[in-house]
Amino acid sequence: MSAVPEPILEIKSVSKFFGGLAANSDVSFTMDEGMILGLIGPNGAGKTTLFNCITGYYPPTKGEILFKGQRLNGMTPDQVCKLGMVRTWQKVRPLAKLSVLDNVVVGALVRTGSVPEAREIAREQLHVVKMAHKADFLAGGLPIGERKKLEVARVLATKPDLLLLDEVMGGLNPAESEDIIQLILDIKKRGLTQMVIEHDMKAIMRISDRIVVLNSGEKLAEGAPQEVVSNPEVVTAYLGEAHV
């Protein structure tokens, strides 16, 4: 009888307080390797705060975060990144005066001290996001859809095991969003685990193996996509009757 593999990420009763305000309260769930987990909820539900706690930008007030069996509490973002977990941001801020390639080189230098090797890694990741033809363009001149893909390339260049995407489809038109959906699914085929914050329910239903719903900082529901969107509490708190 084969042993059950350990989760790649364990969130154990995590709370984050800012003064008397609970941005996250007693949130628990696990992620298996290779899965895509959607993290949804209304604005102010605590989704980005949880990302910040997981990746070392905020220390959790209570609870424990384990990545590949290692306790992350007290680690800095660069330490978490070197362990193999990295995130994107809602507002993309490329290094505007550097080329697209050099933006990705910055990410690759997490894994190597060799600039030629970092450039090779960067070129590989630009191929993954289908932006190799823009390698020599200035990053500051890219439209929003390509800036989002550049950010994904930059974090992929750190060679992560777990990728956290924070509203990577935010502000995109339908064609640009479709590009990102296909990119996320392609990244999954490469074996990379992903957690995705997203408000586009059609998109999150397509890409997610499981969904966790936050509301007012607490976990409201968790389950398979169809199970979650059929949950009356989720409909009331977030989706509305039109999604049923």
Image (tube, rainbow, N blue to C red):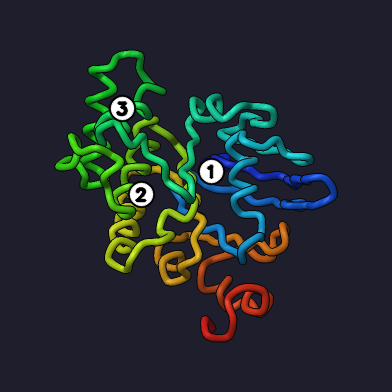
Amino acid at dot 2: Lys
Task: Check disc 3: other Cα within 10 Å, few if <14, some if 14-19, many if 20+.
Answer: many
Q: Which mark is residue 1?
A: 1
- Where is residue 73 shown, x and y percent of the image? 69, 31
C-beta proximity under 8 Å, tags 1 and 3: no
Amino acid at dot 3: Val
Q: Which mark is first along the chain, 3 or 1? A: 1
**Residue ID at (45%, 45%):** 193
The secondary element bearing badge 3 is classed as helix
> With 28 as the anchor, is 122 left or right in this view?
left
The secondary element bearing badge 1 is classed as loop
**Residue ID at (30%, 61%):** 176
Task: Check disc 2: other Cα within 10 Å, few if <14, some if 14-19, many if 20+.
Answer: many
Q: Which mark is residue 120?
A: none
Q: Which is in the foreground here, disc 1 or disc 2?
A: 2
Amino acid at dot 1: Met
Real-space Cα separation, disc 1 to disc 3, in angstroms? 44 Å
Q: Residue 83 or 138: which is nearer the viewer?
A: 138
Q: Residue 222 or 200: which is nearer the viewer?
A: 200
> With 15 as the anchor, is 161 left or right in this view?
left
> With 225 as the anchor, is 234 left or right in this view?
right
- Where is residue 50 shown, x and y percent of the image? 64, 47
**Residue ID at (36%, 49%):** 148
Q: Which mark is first along the chain, 2 or 1? A: 1
**Residue ID at (52%, 85%):** 242
Which residue bears the numbered disc 3?
105
Q: Which mark is residue 148?
A: 2
Q: Residue 28 or 150: which is nearer the viewer?
A: 150
Q: Which is in the foreground here, disc 1 or disc 3?
A: 3
The secondary element bearing badge 2 is classed as helix
- Tally of numbered discs: 3
